[in-house]
Amino acid sequence: MLFPTLNFGLFFLAVFCAAWALLPLPRVRLAFLVVASYAFYAFWDWRFCFLLGGSSIFNWYMGRRIFVTASEHARKLLISGTVAVNLGVLGFFKYYNFFLDNLNGLIGTLHLGKDISYLDVILPVGISFFTFHGISYVVDIYRRKITQPAPLLHILFYISFFPQLVAGPIVRASHFLPQISAPVSAADIRARRAFLLILGGLFKKVVLANYLASNLVDDVFFDPTQYGAWDLLFANYGYAAQIYCDFSAYTDIAIGVAALFGYRFPWNFNQPYRAMGLQDFWRRWHISLSSWLRDYLYISLGGNRHGGLMRYRNLFLTMVLGGLWHGASWNFVIWGSLHGAALVLEHALCRDGLQSALSNVWRKILATLVTFQFTCFTWIFFRAADVPHAASYFAGFTRWHAPLTLATPFNLSLLGLAMALHFLPPDWVGRVENATRRVPLLAWGALAGAGTVAIDSLGPTGVAPFIYFQF
């Protein structure tokens, strides 16, 4: 069930009205939202609701066991085993056939016998996100960031809440569970802000991301041998704009929808293509994932506690594993490795960050342009179907004699508008919210409905799935 569809609109309206009608009965309301979230997930494949429920119950039970265990050694064994089970389930569904592909290739190269048979493993939508939510809960229990184990109903809701279930943002247990326990008040709902986020997200997805994909990006990446270097470069920039508009649109809508139910999600994007350096980029791009990797992986590996070389090793491994998290492909390993190597180099050269090392505006502009170009360069590995396709794309950068044919006025307008979003005032949502406080909420609701219809009419026919649904 995709956000910018009639099915989701009807689903949301029904759940929204029922949830607010049940406000005087908080436990019933919470149970209803859990059932609604499982119905939302069942729209893709009802069988995986059992996986989602099993993951939630397992992490709830292990969280209680870790909490009541006094021995620190036993606590370490429990948390290690719990994280291993979570990652094992994720690894089976996401990486089993990738592992067999490479193992069978090795068997064939060494002439060791017959290939190992494959299993028809279907990747559950959103498994990476709900697995990370489960790990967040048990690790926060272990680190005592959560002072009491949560009731089962709260864990079921935390892991399955439908706005963030399939593509984030990744919400920390220590951030979200206190919200579940607190009473929800209609007076605290910032409805105007939620409407702005939802409308902005719909525009970025339905108009910008979908047209960039259908008019520019998809055809070029499908067969880059048919295009010259200028077209390949233009499509590369087009994909950078598309993936930003697509993914930030999902999280903006998710944040807005959650806010209308009375819950706060963390901000996930902060104009990432304005970054001056890779450290700055990863503080702005998919913030909930990069901070999760820092706090739960990088620090667990040792962080910067054991000297410079170990710090660089841990940083590089974190980015490689972060790349592999995105999918079972060597493309993602290469993408993560390139970002890891660049971050290590940047840390080694600028210990306090590249931004603080830049002394004038022209150097800052140059740093922003270099960072953006490096990010676009690595997006080719992220978008290409496999390593040979990526190599074919890069090989096309020798064909500079071919004319630029894809930079039509419409495509230039799409790309220009997508990039212009990075130069809006960072607090533009708050400014519009404050400027429209005197507009009645009923009028805002009518405007939001009219805006949704208008955006839908502007977009191409059909709605492609969000890019991050595959992760």
Image (tube, rainbow, N blue to C red):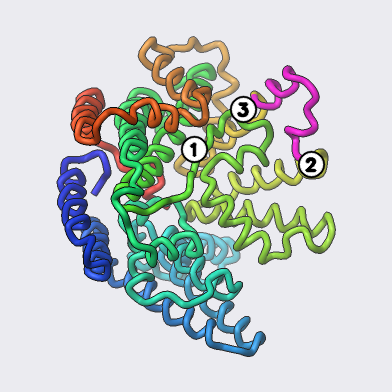
Circle 3 is placed at which residue position? 373
Q: Which residue is mark 1?
A: 389
Q: Tag count in the figure?
A: 3
Q: Which residues are magenta?
A: 353-368
Q: Is residue 188 above or below residue 64?
A: above
Side of 240 relative to 217 (left or right): right
Give the CA separation, mark 3 to mark 2.
Answer: 22 Å
Q: Secondary structure at mark 3?
A: helix
Numbered disc 2: secondary structure: loop
**Side of 37 where 373 appears, left or right:** right
Q: Nearer the viewer, mark 1 or mark 2?
A: 2
The residue closer to the viewer here, 3 or 20, is: 20
**Quick check: marks 1 and 2 in contact, CB under 8 Å?**
no
Q: CA distance from mark 1 to mark 2?
A: 38 Å
- Left or right, 210 with respect to 133, comes to left
Residue 307 or residue 153, whichever sits in front: 153
> What residue lies at 54% left-to-right and 25% top-to-bottom?
396
The chief SS type of the magenta part is helix
> At which x and y percent is residue 287?
54, 46
Q: Kindly indicate whether the residue at mark 2 contacts the one at mark 3 (C-beta within 8 angstroms).
A: no
* Camera-nearest label, 1 or 3: 3
Q: Amino acid at mark 1?
A: His
Q: Amino acid at mark 2?
A: Asp
Is residue 129 visible in this depiction of the protein? yes
Q: Which mark is residue 352?
A: 2
Q: Which residue is depicted at the point 61% across and 72% down?
A: 143
Q: Is residue 92 magenta?
A: no
* Disc 2: CA contacts within 10 A as few (<14), some (14-19) or many (>=20): few
Callout 1 secondary element: helix
The image shows residue 178, relative to residue 351, as above or below, that is: below
Q: Does 367 appear in magenta?
A: yes
Q: Position of residue 266 (x, y in %)?
A: 47, 49
